[in-house]
Image: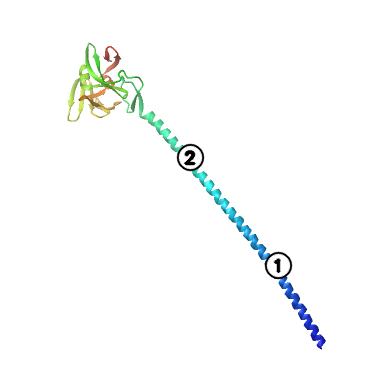
Amino acid sequence: MKNIFKLLLLLILVFATTSFTYLSVRADGDDEKREHNEYKYRDDGYKHKEDDEKREHNEHKYGDDGDKHKEDDDVQYEERIQNQKNKQINQTNEVMESWSKWSRSAAIGVSQEQLPIKDSMKVKIQNGNESITVVAYPYRSEVMIPIKETSELLGADVAIYENIQAVEVVYQQKQLICRLGSRAVYENGLKTPMPVPTLAYNNELYAPISVLANGLGYTITYDSQKGFIFALN
């Protein structure tokens, strides 16, 4: 009986020792596996972090490139629009003017030829056998002359309205009304553009010589010896 008891006790000790060894080995294996996984996840975490940093860098890069391209596109667009506007302005707001011909255009006059005078000076104005000397001066694309004296030389009746700073010229069936500072002249009651406004000079109202000549039915030429020559159409 004692032998049987000792044998059972020995078997129990062997079984307990074996189980403990197995559990220890398994625990060590689990620890190693868990540690391996931790390293793996840590490495993966570092990798993801590196990928995130790389992606963020690329986003900044592409974002900067996008902003740069957008700025370039905006500049090119603005330049294109401005060029179109300048082209339209040149086409619609400018017209080639001749100092001797009244275009009646609302556009800004640009001289297509050299003016016969370069500075304010006394010039002769001739109509048939009659002539007078007046002070004329260049202004933009026009030759400016005194309205009253020139119109009277052409045989027109002139009325000055000082209260509204205007002058009325009537010759046969033709009428012109000019007002100081205005680019418009009333030609036979019709508001018509002039290349430049009516101006005051030497206490007189001045207008382009082409407006007075063409508006009253005359043509105008220039001769260096005879001055400005008016002739009826």
Query: In the displayed image of the protein, which residue is found farthest to the bottom?
Result: 1
Q: Dot 2 lies on which element? A: helix
Question: Of 123 and 221, which appears nearest the observer?
Answer: 123
Q: Quadrant of residue 100?
A: top left
- Identify which amino acid the numbered label 1 is placed on: Gly
Q: Residue at x 36, y 27 (%)?
A: 94
Q: Is residue 49 left or right of residue 139?
A: right
| Quadrant including the N terminus | bottom right
Between 86 and 216, the one nearer to me in the picture: 86
Picture residue at 68% right of the left edge, 65% below the top: 33
Vertical side of 53 occupied by 175: above or below:
above
Q: Secondary structure at mark 1?
A: helix
Residue 111, horizontal then vertical, whole percent: 34, 23
Across the whole image, how many numbered discs are drawn on residues? 2
Q: Position of residue 227 (x, y in %)?
A: 27, 14
- Circle on res. 72: 2
Percent x, y of residue 77: 45, 38
Decide which of 113, 169 is in the foreground and name it: 113
- Is 64 placed left or right of 22 in the picture? left
Asked if one can make out residue 154 in the rendered structure from this viewpoint, the answer is no
- The answer to whether residue 21 shows anywhere in this view is yes
Q: Which residue is mark 1?
A: 29
Find out whether the residues at labels 2 and 1 contact each other: C-beta distance under 8 Å: no
Alpha carbon distance from label 2 to label 1: 63 Å
Residue type at the position of mark 2: Asp
Q: Is residue 80 above or below residue 222?
A: below
Q: Where the C terminus falls, by quadrant?
A: top left
Which mark is drawn over residue 46?
A: none
Neighbour tally class for label 2: few under 14, some 14-19, many 20 plus, Cα within 10 Å:
few
Nearer the observer, disc 2 or disc 1? 1
Q: Is residue 82 left or right of residue 207?
A: right
